[in-house]
Amino acid sequence: MQAILSIEWMKVKKYRTFWILSALFLFMLPAWNYGLKNGVLKVGGNGVNILNQVYSYSYVWENIGYWTSLFVVFLSVLVIILTTNEYQFKTNRQNVIDGWSRLQFFHAKWGMVVVLSLLTTLYVFINGVVFAAAGGSMSGFPGHIEKLFYTFVLTLNYFSFSLLLAFIFKRSGITIGIFFLYSMFVETLLKSLLNWKLSSNPGNFLPLQCSDELLPFPLMDMLKTIAKMQSETNNAYYVIASFVWIIIYYLISRRLLLKSDW
Amino acid sequence: MENILSINNISKSYGPVRALNDVSFEVPPGSVFGILGPNGSGKTTLLGILLDVLQADAGTYSWFNNPASSESRRQIGSLLETPNFYHYLSAVDNLKIAAAIKQRGHNDINNVLEKVNLLQRKDSKFQTYSLGMKQRLAIASALLGNPRVLVFDEPTNGLDPAGIAEIRDLIRQLNSEGITIVMASHLLDEVEKVCTHVAILKRGQLLLSGPVNETLRSEDQIEVSAMNLDHLKQVIASMPGIKDIKPVNGSLLLSCDNNILPEQVNKYCIDNSIVLSHLAMKKKSLETKFMELTNN
């Protein structure tokens, strides 16, 4: 696996798009949270700012985790481009012709997705520590550190979903379009329909939504806690649902790559 | 001696189109094996199957008498259809990736670039290359790590005449070093010049395969002419060993058995009181033979 990943690294380390999209994510996440922390970003009036959030333990993880779940689309686009590039350049064929098995090519991409999720989680961790320290309070560490694990689950779900779409559609434009259409509109619609028609919120268990449920908008979470309305569904179910979906993406894409012509 | 490659009853369809139909042949070691056929005859499909980028519907193949595996592919240098490289990387960086996948070191990268005359441009990005340079880089990539076998699909595509001659010389030279070469081509000339063995494909059917000097042996033809062509034709038709007579531009083109020589034709005519005004030996071109084979 190490040899495979080092080859994936050779493919991206001199690729400008890789660095630009990564830089956008690396910059946007702290910049946005900085804006929130200092009240530059506001929604509301009369001294009320519903975006105002607490950046001390133990809330820092869920705040940054939530915003990560939005900015992570930069990296999803990156996963899509890196994968569809192989089809566009036909280098997927060349890798196999040169001596990889199809499965090695497949696992190279999955390895990339896992590493990217781990690095994103590490970056969120560093941001959390820095923001909490800047707030002057080091007490309470690590706080709700399980939310950091949820961030990992969410990024892994988003990246592997993007990977599946890239394997299916093979062209970057259409794959990115479908990714945004699904994640922003189709799933929201489906979720609302399902939850409206059926009891016990099955819509929350849709592919990306189950991970989104782990990191809801922070204010909502606090309100729920205050009102003792904490959703009956335990987060453990959402973690399990996320991993079930990830395994499903893996199995579908594996079958697709092993059985079809390249 | 073991065969480099054995192909057994491979078939493949794209929907209703039969791209390959029950194709079998064997590639002996040390040969330059040409897969010859017109456009759309299934050459690239066949090579794609042999390199595991396409799935056969039926049939098997083996490299080096072993079932196909990624390990055997690492001993094969291939150029399939188009040069496939990362557009944003330089030639050297692309070859480093290929070498890493082949599990070879980087030390022969400069060597192979030198062989295809790309050393000066080795740090330029692939996307800045001309078609011919891309093709050369693909050949360089195939040469990485001293492969036992080279598989080339239309290796001279996009090259200028000098480039074509260079690649031909390179192929001959590599073959003389003991490397077996399998190449697909629609250019009969190319196959005739460099190949020792040939398989001819037409619409997915294998028409024939074997050593070039047996399968593509040129037949001799004799051209004759006389004052009275009709009379000449009648007389010649009765000569033993003459298989076919075709009138061409005021003369007759005779297809005959191999042992018939022009002087025998001349003597036969004189014995029958005809004086020939023209007598010439003609090599039937391979082009004609190829067209005959691949046309209905």
Image: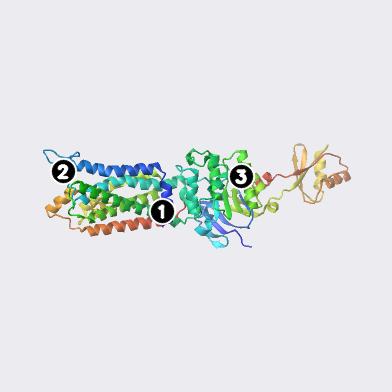
Which of the 4 quarters of the picture holds residue B254?
A: top right
- Quickly name the residue at label 3: B167
Asked if badge 1 and badge 2 are on a common chain, one would say: yes
Report the chain holding disc 3.
B
- Quickly name the residue at label 1: A5
Q: How is the image coloured?
A: rainbow
Residue A108 on image: x %, y %: 41, 54
SS of the residue under disc 3: helix
- Image disc number at residue A50: 2
Report the chain holding disc 1.
A
Q: Compare residues A98 and B32 and report the one nearer the observer.
A: A98
Report the chain holding disc 2.
A
Q: Compare residues A3 and B208 and report the one nearer the observer.
A: A3
Q: CA distance from mark 1 to mark 2?
A: 43 Å
Look at label 2 and name its amino acid. Ile
Residue A165 horizontal side relative to residue B55, left or right = left
